[in-house]
Image (spheres, helix red, strand yellow):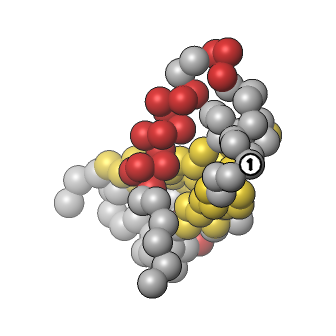
Amino acid sequence: MKQGLSLQTLLSAAMLVGCGTALAAAPIPSGLSITSTVTLDDESFDPVGGASQAGSLKQIIGGVTTTSSFTGSPSSISPDALGGALTHIGDGIGASFSMSGTY
């Protein structure tokens, strides 16, 4: 059985250790391995009527930030997945989405 940390656990840990400025660039201890992935189902439907939607995926690995975002159609996001081995304290993944409209 493969065990891993949940997205919530990883984000909480990343925010907790990322709060201290002095710790932001410290490497993760060599005996600890953390792999992260955040994915969007880009086969989702486009907004209809007066609806609008937008979203973004973000990763920080080795202090380098990569962002992928869309407005309107989720199929326009590229890449639709981000991830890899977290190497430094303060690395992490995140997702942000907003939707609005009336029916």
On screen, 73 above or below 95? below
Q: Residues within 10 Å of mark 1 (few under 14, many from 20)?
A: few
Quarter placement of the N terminus: bottom left
Quarter-of-image position of residue 37: bottom right
Q: Is residue 96 visible?
A: no
In the rendered image, residue 41, in percent from the top left (x then y), is placed at 50, 73
Quarter placement of the C terminus: bottom left
| Residue farthest left in this picture | 103
Q: Is residue 72 left or right of residue 60?
A: left
Q: Is residue 44 visible?
A: yes
Residue at x 64%, y 16% (from the top left corner):
21
Residue at x 75%, y 37% (from the top left corner):
27
Asked whether 2 or 43 is in front, the reply is 2
In the rendered image, residue 52, in percent from the top left (x then y), is placed at 41, 53
In the rendered image, residue 66, in percent from the top left (x then y), is placed at 73, 47
Judging by the rendered image, the residue that carries numbered circle 1 is: 30
Q: Is residue 101 left or right of residue 67?
A: left
Looking at the rendered structure, the secondary structure element under dot 1 is: loop
Residue at x 58%, y 49% (from the top left corner):
93
Quarter-of-image position of residue 53: bottom left
Residue at x 48%, y 66% (from the top left corner):
4
| Residue farthest bottom in this picture | 1
Asked whether 67 or 93 is in front, the reply is 93
In the rendered image, residue 92, in percent from the top left (x then y), is placed at 60, 45
> Label 1 sits on what residue type?
Ser
* Total numbered badges shown on the rendered structure: 1
